[in-house]
Structures are given as structure tokens and as C-alpha cells.
Image (tube, helix red, strand yellow):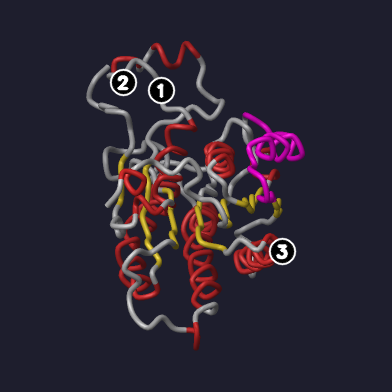
């Protein structure tokens, strides 16, 4: 192995298309992932759904401005394709993946990666107050949509193989799925029964999905990004919990993006079936 083989590739995602969901706000994790993927050479298909954000305290962002920001990071020959969709609606996860397949063909960059970053934040409630409707809505967005996206992605890329099937596991798999979960396994999520349950389902099924897709050279991992400031944290609120963070700061969207884009690259070729907690040493028992 030469030094060139060991050196970091400055464009590890060049010539590939990456589908990222939940890219609706410049302050969000999805935007940070899309910017890093673009800067690393990928063509990006960015799913967005502003009505969710409009219903939250932080409000919706300007989608055109979000996409323009991502576009500034594209490398030569790479493309950005926005796709709007309510992933809780029947058939929409498949439509989004179909749009990504079409965009990948137009760019002549094969679709190799899926990042399921979409999430429903509110409404939610504690156990004694939770309702069937809220439970079902979180399940549809936070869990069901991710499973259906993974299914559609796998069907699309497996269909590109001769006969629709791989001859055996790829020795150096370049295809990857990354789910996002939360810290429900690290400590309680007070008042977030529906969100915690749906995110736990994704973390819990990751190993099974990884096992099923290994024969097709598709790696599957799940990331818990920990507490990340996506525009809702005030300075006063952080001061009250500063002692829980050994590095003296809250998580930033790019902290999650660094890990997730690395998991999409060939450097992570030996990692699958993992739930990775990336919380910056967050210690819930300290104050």
C-alpha cells in the first residue's frame, strides 16, 4: 500500500449522489450534512418540508435560500436537486427516492447513499397526556418514513445489479444508509413519549436492516447526534446546563454532519449495524 493509498481523499464522495431528508432550515442538521456532502464532491438530492417548521416556535426558513447556500459548496459537475414532500403521506417516501434516482441518472452520478434526517418535533407529551393521534404522527415521520425510504433506496440500487441481485457481499461496500435517532437509550426524554418511542424503533431495527442489506453491499448505521443547537437554544438556557457539557459548548449541526458524511465514505467501509452516540461527552447527571 502506497502513501497515496493512505492519504485522505479531498473529495471522498465525488461522482456519487446522496439523498438527504429534512433539509429545510439553514440552522438544521440536514443543511449541514448537505453542505458537507456537496463540498466532498457529491451530487445532492435535498428533501424538504417547510410546513413542519412553520408550525414550530422557530418557524420556517426560505427554501430557496437554503438550497442556494448548499449550492455554493458544489464541486464541478455535481448537481443539487430539491424535492418537497410530506414523508408521512402514503407513497411519498417512494416518490422521493424515485426523484433521487432520476436526478442521479441525469447527473451520471449513481445514487449511493441515503441519510434519513427528517423528524417531527412537536406536538408531544408525557405518558399521562399522550394521545393516539400524536403517537401515530410521530411514528409516521420518525420511524415509518425512514423504513420505507430505506426499502425504496435498497430496491432502487439492487435493481441496478445484474438480475436484480448481488452475487455476494461486496468486499468494499460503497453504498450506505444512515438513520438518525436520539438519546432515548442514554437517559430519559421527559415529555417526549411519542418522539422517544419512534426514534427508539429506528435504533432498534438498524442491526436487522444492516444484516438484510449486507449481501447487497449496503452499509447501515444509526447516529444519535446528541443535543444540537439548531436555532432554538438561548444563551440563558445554555448557562443553566453548561456543566453537563465537558467541552463547554452545545452540539453544532456540523458536528453531526462530520460523522455522517464520513459514514457515507469508503473510509467507513467496515462499519455497519452500529448505533453511534456522538454527544460530545454530554453528562446528564451533571449540572
Can you tell which quarter of the image residue 182 is in?
top left
The reply to whether discs 1 and 2 touch (Cβ–Cβ < 8 Å) is yes
Per the model, the C-alpha gap separating discs 1 and 3 is 40 Å
Which range is magenta?
58-80
Identify the residue at horizontal 48%, vertical 58% (top origin): 139
The disc placed on residue 245 is 2
Identify the residue at horizontal 58%, vertical 57% (top origin): 17
Viewer-nearest residue: 232 or 56: 232
Disc 3 secondary structure class = helix
Horizontal side, residue 124 vs residue 217: left or right: right
The disc placed on residue 106 is 3
- Image location of residue 154, percent across then percent down: 49, 71
Specify the farthest residue to the left.
Answer: 285
- From this viewpoint, is residue 204 visible? yes
Horizontal side, residue 91 vs residue 132: left or right: right
The disc placed on residue 250 is 1
Q: Residues within 10 Å of mark 1 (few under 14, many from 20)?
A: many
Q: Residues within 10 Å of mark 3 (few under 14, many from 20)?
A: few
Per the model, the C-alpha gap separating discs 1 and 2 is 7 Å
Q: Is residue 159 above or below residue 60?
A: below
Disc 2 secondary structure class = loop
- Image location of residue 44, percent across then percent down: 62, 51
Amino acid at each position: 500500500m502506497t502513501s497515496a493509498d493512505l492519504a485522505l481523499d479531498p473529495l471522498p464522495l465525488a461522482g456519487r449522489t446522496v439523498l438527504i431528508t429534512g433539509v429545510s432550515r439553514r440552522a438544521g442538521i440536514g443543511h449541514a450534512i448537505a453542505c458537507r456532502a456537496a463540498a466532498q464532491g457529491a451530487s445532492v438530492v435535498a428533501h424538504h418540508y417547510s410546513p413542519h417548521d412553520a408550525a414550530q416556535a422557530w418557524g420556517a426558513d426560505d427554501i430557496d435560500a437554503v438550497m442556494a447556500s448548499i449550492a455554493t459548496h458544489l464541486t464541478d459537475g455535481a448537481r443539487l436537486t430539491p424535492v418537497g414532500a410530506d414523508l408521512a403521506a402514503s407513497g411519498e417516501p417512494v416518490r422521493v427516492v424515485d426523484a433521487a434516482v432520476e436526478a442521479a441518472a441525469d447527473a451520471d452520478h449513481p445514487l449511493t447513499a441515503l441519510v434519513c434526517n427528517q423528524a417531527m418535533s412537536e406536538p408531544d407529551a408525557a405518558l399521562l397526556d399522550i394521545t393516539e393521534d400524536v403517537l401515530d404522527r410521530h411514528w409516521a415521520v420518525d420511524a415509518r418514513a425512514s423504513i420505507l425510504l430505506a426499502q425504496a433506496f435498497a430496491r432502487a440500487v439492487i435493481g441496478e445489479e445484474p438480475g436484480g441481485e448481488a452475487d455476494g457481499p461486496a468486499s468494499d461496500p460503497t453504498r450506505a444508509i444512515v438513520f438518525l435517532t436520539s438519546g432515548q437509550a442514554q437517559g430519559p426524554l421527559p415529555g417526549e413519549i411519542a418522539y422517544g418511542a419512534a426514534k427508539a424503533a429506528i435504533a432498534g431495527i438498524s442491526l436487522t436492516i444492516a444484516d438484510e442489506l449486507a449481501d447487497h453491499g449496503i452499509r447501515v448505521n444509526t447516529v444519535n447526534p446528541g443535543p444540537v443547537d439548531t436555532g432554538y437554544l438561548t444563551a440563558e438556557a445554555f448557562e443553566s446546563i453548561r456543566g453537563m457539557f465537558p467541552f463547554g459548548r452545545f452540539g453544532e449541526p456540523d458536528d453531526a454532519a462530520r460523522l455522517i458524511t464520513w459514514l457515507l465514505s469508503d473510509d467507513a467501509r467496515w462499519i455497519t449495524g452500529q448505533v453511534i452516540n456522538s454527544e460530545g461527552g454530554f453528562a446528564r447527571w451533571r449540572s
